[in-house]
Image (cartoon, rainbow, N blue to C red):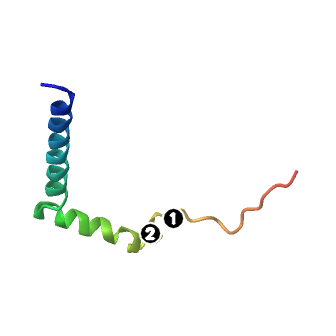
Amino acid sequence: MDINDLRSIVTVLAFIAFVGILWWAFSDRRKETYEAAAMLPLDDDSEFIPQVSRNTERKSS
């Protein structure tokens, strides 16, 4: 076994890992999670914004 055989084995293992990650990421069990994450930028965040009092004045130095 020389270095080229080792390189071939590592390449095949990396490809198998890549295909496994793709299969995991695009599986149907994660569809709801990804759809919820896709809607996050469109959700209304107004309930999380702190209300600032209008009567407060800033002190200037």
Q: Which residue is mark 1?
A: 49
Q: Are marks 1 and 2 in contact (CB under 8 Å)?
A: yes
**Label 2, residues with CA under 10 Å away: few <14, some 14-19, many ≥20:** few
Label 1 secondary element = loop
Q: Which residue is mark 2?
A: 45
In this view, the residue in front, 25 or 12, is 12
Tell me which amino acid carries mark 2. Answer: Asp
Q: Is residue 45 left or right of residue 22?
A: right
Q: Is residue 3 above or below residue 35?
A: above
Q: Is residue 51 left or right of residue 32?
A: right
> Toward which corner of the image does residue 22 lie, by quadrant?
bottom left
State the separation of the CA atoms marked 1 and 2: 7 Å
Residue at 17% across / 30% down in the picture?
A: 6
The image position of residue 53, as x and y in percent, is 64, 65
In this view, the residue in front, 3 or 24, is 3
Q: Is residue 53 left or right of residue 16?
A: right
The image position of residue 43, as x and y in percent, is 38, 72
Return the residue found at the far right.
Answer: 61
Label 2 secondary element = loop
